[in-house]
Amino acid sequence: MRIPTMCTLFLCCIAITTVQGQTKTTTSKTAAAKMEVLTNKSVVDLSKAGLDEELIVSKIASSTCHFDISTDGLVNLKKEGVTAGIIKVMMDKTNGKTVTTAPTEPAKQTTTETKAQTVISKNVYAAAELMNHVYFFNKSSSAAQPLEKAVAGLRTKQGMFSGSSVWHVDGDKSNIRIPQSETCSFIINTGSSALPELVLYKLKTGKNRREVANMKVGTFTGVTTGEDVISINISKLQEGIFQITPGKKLDKGEYFFTGKPANGANSIDAYTFGID
């Protein structure tokens, strides 16, 4: 009877020792997790490992953090490929602000649109090298083509009962041709957060000239402006990059964009194109 008793005691000791070892291991891992402090390097490692931004933000929100958000620290984070969204969360965490781990409902509704705009803006930023130059943007190929830059001069025309001032561009057509079947979308890189002030004119063509009335004065009609101005919608793609969309489908003809003319200006930069 003694042998079974000794075996039983021996097995019980092994079981107790094993449970105690597992408990110590689990406790040790839990303590290590609690003692973990996220640093800039931690975030860089998580980002390079391919974790989604949402997971990294959640990790930051639930962890003790010690981030370097000095100018050099932020520059290094950007060089290492950490996204602007994660860097913003790191700054908020360091400054004691609440870190949101889940997007709000409106953000969910615009996720697809936001992702599409991100893809467009990255391609646009790489293509729109000339500052304050208007480009035609082909969404299907993500290609940006600079419009032809010209100088429009101011001329006056005088009749018996009316007169007008017109913007005049040499040449009867632009070298930049856009098929009417294409969706007309344009971009501009201003390098500024302020919306650009642009005007889109439809031009009348003649022998070696393109022109549009800036202002008309008639004895019976008074002063009229903007008869040949096409309305446009301007939206921000990213900081300094804006998308310009005509308010209606453009008819065949000649057009140009220009900045809002200054009072008394005798010439303006014109970014010309034609619709075929």
Image: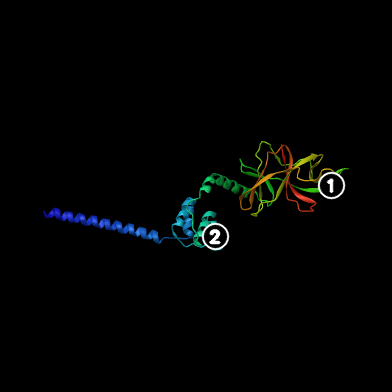
Question: SS class of the residue under badge 1?
Answer: strand
Residue at x-position 33% and y-position 57%: 26
In this picture the colour scheme is rainbow
Residue at x-position 51% and y-position 47%: 108
Q: CA distance from mark 2 to mark 1?
A: 56 Å
Q: Residue 274: where, in percent of width, then height?
A: 72, 40
In the displayed structure image, the side of residue 206 where residue 26 appears, left or right: left
Front-most of residues 106 and 3? 106
Amino acid type at image mark 1? Thr
Residue at x-position 58% and y-position 46%: 117
Amino acid type at image mark 2? Leu
In the displayed structure image, the side of residue 28 where residue 15 appears, left or right: left
Front-most of residues 152 and 232? 232
Q: Residue 93: where, in percent of width, then height?
A: 49, 60
Residue 44 to residue 120: above or below: below
Q: Earlier in the sequence, mark 2 or mark 1?
A: 2
Disc 1 target residue = 156
Front-most of residues 63 and 175? 63
Disc 2 target residue = 74
Q: In this orientation, does residue 83 appear?
A: no
Classed neighbour count for the residue bearing mark 2: other residues with Cα under 10 Å, few (<14), some (14–19), many (≥20): many
Q: Residue furthest left?
A: 1
